[in-house]
Image (cartoon, rainbow, N blue to C red):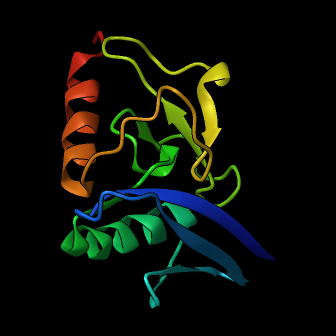
Amino acid sequence: MNEEHTVFLIGGGTGGDEQATFTLYDMGTKCRLTCSYRNKMIEAEEDDYFEALFQIRQELEVDGLLPFCYGASANVYPEGVMEMGRGLTVCKVKMGQPPQRTDLVNIFDESYDVAPVFAHMQQQFWDAWLASLPS
């Protein structure tokens, strides 16, 4: 699988529209993801594409950039759906509610409800969501 996705980048202080190209490579048991932007390239190899994107996002943050896609949105996480598409599918979650099948989205898709955040903030939202679920 060599698949490409173009994603807008927000932040970075340039005031203009920036884009990054994410290229996915299926390496058998590993997933390799590259991100090309501003004549730079970041690469990550992980067990799934969500985790690879997470690693790349941490490097993009150094330039103050956030990808505008579900994989960088506060309210998504791959928990419980990892076997679906090797981390390409994530679930949108709402406080106090278990996820529904209709809440599944691709990490590189964008929509009106994408709320990009820094990587550590996404983890904090996830922890808060888990705590909000009924026992």
Residue under the point 57% across and 33% down: 111
Position in image of residue 94 (x %, y %): 39, 18
Can you see residue 78? no
Query: Height in image: 23 above or below 101?
Result: below
Q: Residue furthest right?
A: 1
Position in image of residue 85 (x %, y %): 70, 55
Position in image of residue 34 (x %, y %): 55, 82
Residue under the point 19% across and 28% down: 128
The residue nearer to you, when weighing 64 against 53, is 64
Q: Is residue 99 left or right of residue 13?
A: right
Can you see residue 112? yes
For the N terminus, give its image quadrant: bottom right
Residue under the point 56% across and 66% down: 49
The residue nearer to you, when weighing 100 against 8, is 8
Q: Residue furthest front?
A: 15
Query: Height in image: 88 above or below 124?
Result: below
Count of number-bearing discs: 0
Position in image of residue 124 (x %, y %): 18, 41
Q: Is residue 27 left or right of residue 103?
A: right
Query: Height in image: 55 above or below 16?
Result: below
For the C terminus, give its image quadrant: top left
Q: Is residue 89 left or right of residue 80?
A: right
Query: Height in image: 24 above or below 11?
Result: below
